[in-house]
Amino acid sequence: MAAESRESLRQLIRRKLGRSKFIVVSNREPYMHVFRDGRIDWIRPASGVTVALDPVMRASRGLWVAHGSGEADPKVTDPRGFVAVPPDRPSYRLKRVWLSRRQEENYYYGFANSALWPLCHVAYRRPVFREEHWDAYREVNQLFADRVAEEVGKERAFLFIQDYHFALLPRMLRKRCPQAIIAQFWHIPWPNPEVFRICPWRQEILDGMLGNDILGFHIRYHCENFIATVDRELEARPDRELTAVVFRGHMTKIRAFPISIDFEDISRRAGSPETKRLAASIRRKYRLPENCILGLGADRIDYTKGIPERLDAIALLLERYPQYRSRLVFFQAGVPSRTQIQEYCRLAEEVEERVRAINQKYGRGAWQPIVFAREHFDLPHLLALYRMARFALVSSLHDGMNLVAKEFVAAQSDGNGVLLLSQFTGASRELLDAIIINPYSPDEVAERIRDAIEMNPIEVRRRMGRLREQVREHNIYRWASSVIKKLTKFA
Ligand code: F6P
């Protein structure tokens, strides 16, 4: 079967969405304007959601509504909040919603990222439930409902809401725009009912989400958890046959849509001379020995990613197998994230400390076993790192999908590279030829890293070949097409 492409998606969108409006809503904007050296510049934030949806928006030429969080955003935005993006090749419109500092603190850093994020990831960080966070969350959801509704008016529209920042928005929009078809994609895991029941506002959250026509998760397991949670908490009628819930006379279909990446684009770019050039400059910058065995971790600095746990595994490997000392370098790219939350700052310090201790214990002269690069990496630099690495270690404690794993695979256009992947990522359900690991067990991870390093080159290529086939076929366009086909069934 031919893989879906940007062109086939564009045709599908034209055929299916016709003259209807197509509006995507997310907290994080796909392009952010910043000041750099006294000039206005733009960046693409490190977010799986925006990476996945940008190609869909380019194909659909729709409207994207998001929080304008870049310091220079207001400078390039018209009085109604619109700006054309991508800034270097405009093909769709972004409508920025402005939030006050208080709203951002309490809604984004507060309820979304200190309550819902730890609650849904179950990574053993206690969620923080505060009334003022919840109030701001409701207020910001309402603000977005107003901004979206004024774009929809009385027209036919497909509204596609992203993630846990907007659990209340579907219900609010259903009231304001009853003619619209509303779908939401929840990019993070959904926990079991026992975990979810500690949330003081659980019924309001579920009620909000059941305003959708379709509710998507990455994997079936999260769909089942959601239905079980509704069953426990609401007077609703779950239909396990149809994987749907009927509540207040309205049916919400719950479906798994495993998100992905633009395989062909990444594969092509990763093999380009530009990537080679960037790889050489990274080698120089971080003084990476030409002949070292390079392992890679690439994550936002987030406790769900299991960074300290993976460092423990590397330390154990060096302890047990001294032959890797002076040969192995583990490069951890750590993109700063949510730095206003104490838990995240503490984690960054903890990682720094671990790295220092390991380098002190196992370093030999100029050779340092761990390089921790705490900075923003754009896609071209990530691609260079993917190509340089002999293995990538994706050891999240819990992850809805994890697109780094898929990007790493797509970048190996020469067929090399070994992927070690946590069994608690959504991606592990699809990437069966990765070495699957339990990130909570340093002993197991250390042994599996050794397997990765020692793997016979024929086996490396055989596994990578199959992984590439999987991601090539199940690319972002296929994800978007299946969401759109499902959406338009309601029209
Ligand atoms: O779905 C989780 C997610 O929204 C991912 O898309 C992304 O990796 C991360 O969280 C981004 O976080 P933030 O937008 O808070 O920087």
Image: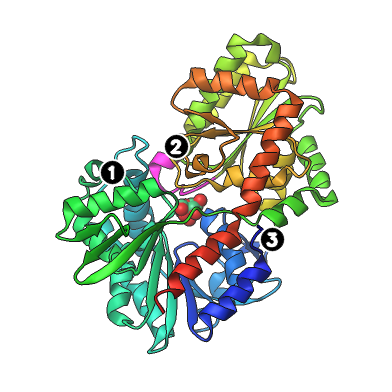
Classify the position of the N terminus by image quarter: bottom right
Compare marks 3 and 2 and give the one earlier in the sequence. 3
Residue 184 spot, x, y in % from top left: 40, 64
Classify the position of the C terminus by image quarter: bottom left
Residue 208 spot, x, y in % from top left: 27, 65
Label 1: element kind: loop
Q: Which of these two is toward me, 159 or 316?
A: 159
Distance of mark 2 from mark 1, alpha carbons?
A: 14 Å
Determine if the C-beta at disc 1 is less than 8 A from ligand 1: no
Q: Which of these two is toward me, 368 or 166?
A: 166
Distance of mark 3 from mark 1, alpha carbons?
A: 48 Å
Report whether 161 appears left or right of 39.
Answer: left
Mark yes or no: residue 417 visible: no
State how many labels appear. Answer: 3
- Residue at point 45%, 22% (across, down): 441
Q: Main secondary structure of the magenta part?
A: loop
Residue 227 spot, x, y in % from top left: 27, 53
Judge the density around disc 3: few (<14), some (14-19), many (≥20) Cα neighbours within 10 Å. few
Residue topped by disc 1: 192
Compare marks 3 and 1 and give the one earlier in the sequence. 3
Per the rendered image, the range of residues in magenta is: 336-345
Query: Image quarter for residue 4?
Result: bottom right
Residue topped by disc 2: 424
Judge the density around disc 1: few (<14), some (14-19), many (≥20) Cα neighbours within 10 Å. some
Mark yes or no: residue 211 visible: yes
Report whether 136 appears left or right of 352.
Answer: left
Residue topped by disc 3: 37
User: Of the residues shown, which amino acid type is indicated by label 3?
Assistant: Asp
Distance of mark 3 from mark 2, alpha carbons?
A: 42 Å
Judge the density around disc 2: few (<14), some (14-19), many (≥20) Cα neighbours within 10 Å. many
Asked whether 488 falls inside the magenta stretch, the response is no
- Mark 2 touches mark 1? (CB < 8 Å): no
